[in-house]
């Protein structure tokens, strides 16, 4: 009994396994009749496309010849235009650049440009920047009139609110940290400066306009007599 058990093979043993047998691949040849028909159709379409392109090329031959004849004219015109542009750039760019730079310098040195920088500094909320821009604007505003100060400008403006704003700005910059003071507002300060500037500009414009004499003639009767004598001499 023991001998029979040892010689009987076990059907579940791994030794009884075999490799998978793969079938031979299917060949693509010979092709089906439909593939031959499709190949002939594609070949005929390709031949027709080549023939149509050659025919179109023969029909457009005169156009190519005309374009080739005019091509040199186009190239010559382009070269002449480049030469003219180079000559204009060489002779006129430097004077134009100098004038443009001078115009930009005059524009940047105008009182309006200084006030625009003051506006930007005030709206930024930086007290030190606003104070520095204010001093530069006042120097430009009083151009050629000595060394003006902020106090002189405030005095000439005769504006109590502007004086308060100026004092708040100075306390903001120069007062001790523990000293209580009202908060300085850059926007309010700019609005006050803009109003004072507008009023001063209107005053200057009004003074510069020609007007009537401040005093009447000292001797109106003498003027009437001279006018009558001149009229009589013209009549005679």
Image (spheres, rainbow, N blue to C red):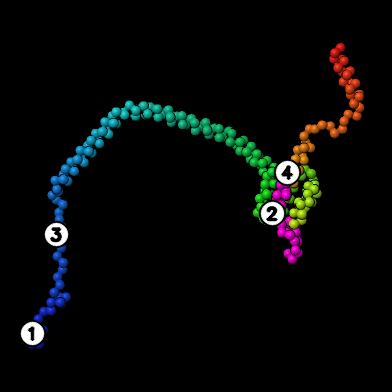
Q: Residues within 10 Å of mark 1 (few under 14, many from 20)?
A: few
- Magenta run includes residue 30: no
Q: Is residue 98 visible?
A: no
Spatial CA span between label 2 and label 3: 92 Å
* 4 or 3: mark nearer the eye: 4
The region drawn magenta spans 169-195
Which residue is drawn at the image coordinates 22% and 38% (left, top)? 45
Which quarter of the image is occupied by the N terminus? bottom left
Q: Circles 1 and 4: CB distance less than 8 Å?
A: no
Which residue is drawn at the image coordinates 16% and 52% (left, top)? 28
- Where does label 4 land, which residue? 198
* 1 or 4: mark nearer the eye: 4
- Expressed as whole percent of the image width and height from the top left, the position of residue 120 reads 66, 50
- Where does label 1 land, which residue? 4
- Where does label 3 land, which residue? 24
Residue 214: quarter of image: top right
* 1 or 3: mark nearer the eye: 1
Which residue is drawn at the image coordinates 14% and 48% (left, top)? 32
Callout 2: helix, strand or loop? Answer: helix
């Amino acid at each position: 009994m023991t001998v029979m058990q040892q010689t009987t093979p076990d059907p579940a043993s791994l030794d009884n396994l075999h490799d998978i047998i793969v079938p031979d691949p299917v060949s693509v040849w010979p092709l089906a009749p439909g593939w031959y028909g499709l190949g002939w159709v594609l070949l005929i379409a390709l031949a027709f496309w080549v023939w149509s392109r050659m025919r179109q090329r023969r029909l457009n031959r005169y156009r190519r010849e005309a374009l080739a004849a005019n091509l040199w004219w186009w190239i010559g015109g382009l070269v002449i235009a480049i030469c003219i542009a180079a000559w204009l750039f060489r002779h006129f760019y430097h004077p134009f650049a100098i004038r443009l730079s001078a115009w930009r310098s005059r524009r940047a040195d105008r009182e309006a440009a200084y006030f625009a920088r003051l506006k930007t500094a005030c709206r930024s909320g930086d007290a030190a920047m606003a104070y520095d821009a204010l001093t530069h604007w006042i120097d430009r505003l009083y151009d050629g009139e000595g060394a003006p100060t902020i106090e002189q400008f405030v005095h000439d403006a005769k504006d109590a609110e502007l004086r308060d704003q100026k004092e708040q700005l100075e306390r903001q910059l120069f007062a001790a940290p523990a000293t209580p003071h009202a908060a300085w507002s850059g926007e309010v300060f700019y609005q006050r400066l803009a109003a004072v500037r507008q009023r001063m500009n209107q005053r200057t414009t009004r003074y510069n306009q020609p007007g009537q004499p401040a005093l009447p003639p000292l001797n109106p009767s003498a003027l009437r007599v001279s006018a009558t004598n001149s009229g009589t001499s013209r009549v005679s």
